[in-house]
Image: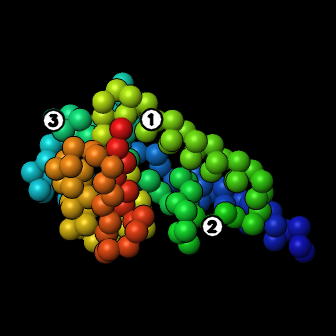
């Protein structure tokens, strides 16, 4: 009986993970709508840039990553909790994703690009999305952090 339940959980988790997309996710589409409505024009998924940013504003040399809290290990977020099954596998996978994210941000900075990372859990408030991107543009990507709802670490603007 217990083995059947575990097998059912593995199959359902596999089916859920199969549905997760890498591009055109709900949070990404939301950010794109907000930016487009505000008059910003951008390119999507530029493969010639390190990390293939989700949104690129070439005019401002700004790369925007829209990160899912689980997949990119958002520190302090309840959505980033690791599954209880195959914990070691998931811990290694998320750690690898975080290392790849850091490397992409550093590489973009070395090329003179500014980077804004938007977290899935903080995208409910549309004005804060716009404020974080506009703030990064105004500040020229200097060591500023933009915060949604006044909470530290919500939407981080990272400098080169």
109 and 15: which is toward the camera: 109
First-in-chain label (1 vs 3): 3
The residue lying at 51 percent from left, 35 percent from top is 103
Circle 1 residue: 106
The answer to whether one can see residue 29 in this image is no
Q: Residues within 10 Å of mark 3 (few under 14, many from 20)?
A: few
Corner quadrant of residue 153: bottom left
Which marked residue is nearer to the observer: mark 3 or mark 2? 3
26 and 39: which is toward the camera: 39
Corner quadrant of residue 140: top left
**Residue furthest toward the front?**
143
Which marked residue is nearer to the observer: mark 1 or mark 2? 1
The residue lying at 43 percent from left, 30 percent from top is 107
Which marked residue is nearer to the observer: mark 1 or mark 3? 1
Q: Is residue 83 left or right of residue 32?
A: right
State yes or no: discs 1 and 3 in contact (Cβ < 8 Å). Answer: no
Q: Secondary structure at mark 2?
A: loop
**Residue furthest toward the left?**
39
Q: On screen, 110 above or below 136?
A: above
The answer for how far apart the CA atoms under marks 3 and 2 are is 37 Å
Q: On screen, 50 above or below 152?
A: above
Q: Is residue 19 left or right of residue 124?
A: right
The answer for how far apart the CA atoms under marks 1 and 3 are is 20 Å
Circle 3 residue: 59
Circle 2 residue: 81
């Amino acid at each position: 009986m217990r083995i059947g339940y575990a097998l059912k959980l593995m199959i359902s988790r596999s089916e859920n993970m199969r549905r997760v997309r890498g591009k055109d996710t709900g949070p990404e589409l939301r950010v794109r709508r907000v930016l487009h409505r505000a008059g910003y024009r951008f390119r999507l998924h530029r493969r010639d840039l390190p990390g293939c940013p989700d949104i690129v504003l070439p005019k401002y040399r700004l790369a925007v990553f829209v990160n899912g809290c689980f997949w990119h290990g958002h520190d302090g977020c309840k959505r980033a909790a690791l599954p209880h099954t195959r914990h070691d596998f998931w811990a290694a996978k998320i750690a690898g994703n975080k290392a790849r994210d850091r490397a992409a941000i550093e590489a973009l900075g070395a090329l003179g690009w500014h980077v804004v990372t938007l977290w899935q859990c903080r995208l409910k408030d549309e004005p804060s999305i716009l404020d974080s991107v506009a703030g990064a543009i105004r500040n020229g990507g200097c060591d500023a952090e933009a915060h949604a709802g006044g909470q530290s670490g919500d939407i981080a603007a990272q400098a080169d």
